[in-house]
């Protein structure tokens, strides 16, 4: 067992048509289970900073999506459908009652679509700067837009990522990502940054880039054809907490506000002077908002995930 940011990390694997890696951050044995899902290019470590604050009252596990972290793509396809299938299968493996899905960026989209695919297994959603399609997405930072355009082009995307990989170290890669996703990367705990660097050094970066490209292209296609996905999200009938950084460069605050409009069970909370990853940049704010929601609008999700008289979720 390792410790990070003041909490334990127990590493596990389950079989969902192949190995799926996840980390159990701990929490009370009889508490509701929060299943955390990272964004594009991320991993279970994206939740390390917020974990110590959440596990005082909730059980927290963080899964690695296909081709991310320590979950290999293997014969599986790391597109949106592949990630949703993995998450649905993972929840069925680790929990004997509904869970609360917590997803950031791409992971927010995957969590929302998983809730529409297996509604009986999901009690509520916490979406942290989710990459959800809207009819009018709002302004995107030119640097981010250029990255997605290059990645979407067959051949050009592969050459772009290969050149970038060859000229940057693991540490430079992590700090570049934090520079885009955070207003002030210095707010991220140093040991959490070091853990991200160590994992990046450990991984097959070429394989990680291949999974990144497949995921990014699938995400771009989903965003471009927003209608079918929006229809599925509109059909959600469960409480949703939407946390969003006011200075997010990847998903605009305007888009987040449009998503929350007219949805009675959808609560939007905005973090001032924060970027795309509040759980890393302002973990205490993130945890306090989640706990307050579980006591208020999300109380029904808490009760369903708690299972009252049933035994605790079996995370193996």
Image: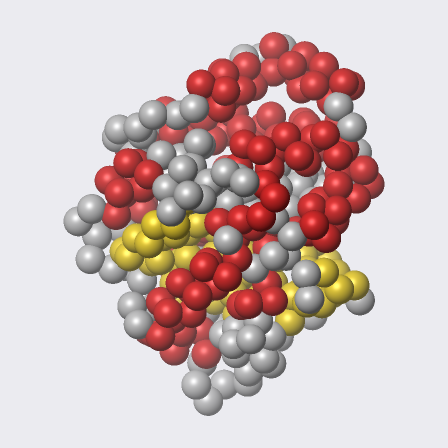
Front one among 280 and 316: 280
In screen coordinates, is 49 left or right of 142?
A: right
Is residue 232 in view? yes
Q: Quadrant of residue 212?
A: top right
The quarter of the picture where the N terminus appears is bottom right
Residue 155 higher or lower than 252, as above or below: above
Is residue 77 in view? no
Q: Residue at the bottom extreme?
A: 309
Give the image location of residue 6, x and y in percent: 69, 66
Q: Residue at x 79, y 63 (%)?
A: 2
Q: Which residue is drawn at 46% across and 78% down?
A: 306
In screen coordinates, is 283 left or right of 20?
A: left
Give the image location of residue 117, x and y in percent: 41, 52
Q: Residue at the left extreme?
A: 262
Give the image location of residue 154, x and y in percent: 58, 12
Describe the colour scheme in one phrase. secondary structure
Q: Residue at x 65, y 66 (%)?
A: 25
Residue 113 higher or lower than 183, as above or below: below
In screen coordinates, is 222 left or right of 22?
A: left
Q: Residue at x 63, y 10 (%)?
A: 155
Tally the marks.
Answer: 0
Give the image location of residue 309, x and y in percent: 46, 89
Front one among 107 and 311: 107
Q: In which quarter of the image is residue 211?
A: top right
Residue 230 higher or lower than 282, as above or below: above
């Amino acid at each position: 067992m390792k410790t990070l940011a003041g909490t334990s990390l127990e590493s596990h694997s389950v079989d969902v048509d192949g190995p799926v890696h996840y980390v159990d951050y701990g929490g009370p044995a009889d508490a509701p289970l929060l299943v955390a899902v990272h964004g594009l290019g991320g991993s279970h470590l994206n939740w390390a900073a917020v974990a110590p604050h959440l596990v005082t009252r909730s059980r927290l596990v963080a899964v690695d999506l296909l081709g991310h972290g320590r979950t290999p793509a293997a014969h599986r396809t790391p597109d949106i459908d592949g990630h949703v299938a993995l998450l649905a299968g993972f929840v069925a493996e680790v929990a004997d009652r509904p869970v609360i899905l917590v997803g950031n960026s791409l992971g927010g989209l995957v969590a929302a679509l998983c809730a529409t695919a297996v509604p009986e297994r999901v009690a509520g959603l916490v979406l942290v700067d989710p990459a959800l399609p809207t009819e009018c997405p709002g302004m995107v930072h030119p640097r981010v837009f250029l990255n997605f355009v290059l990645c979407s082009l067959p051949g050009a995307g592969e050459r772009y990522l290969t050149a970038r990989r060859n000229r940057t170290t693991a540490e430079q890669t992590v700090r570049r990502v934090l520079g885009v996703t955070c207003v002030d990367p210095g707010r991220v705990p140093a040991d959490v940054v070091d853990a991200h660097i160590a994992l990046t050094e450990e991984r097959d970066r070429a394989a990680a880039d291949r999974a990144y490209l497949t995921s990014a292209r699938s995400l771009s296609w989903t965003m471009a054809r927003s209608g079918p996905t929006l229809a599925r999200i509109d059909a959600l009938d469960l409480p949703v907490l939407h946390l969003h950084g006011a200075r997010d460069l990847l998903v605009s605050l305007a888009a987040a506000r449009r998503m929350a409009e007219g949805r009675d069970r959808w609560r939007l909370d905005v973090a001032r002077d924060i970027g795309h990853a509040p759980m890393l940049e302002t973990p205490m704010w993130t945890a306090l908002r989640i706990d307050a929601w579980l006591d208020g609008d999300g109380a029904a999700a808490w009760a369903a995930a708690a299972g009252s008289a049933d035994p605790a979720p079996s995370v193996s």
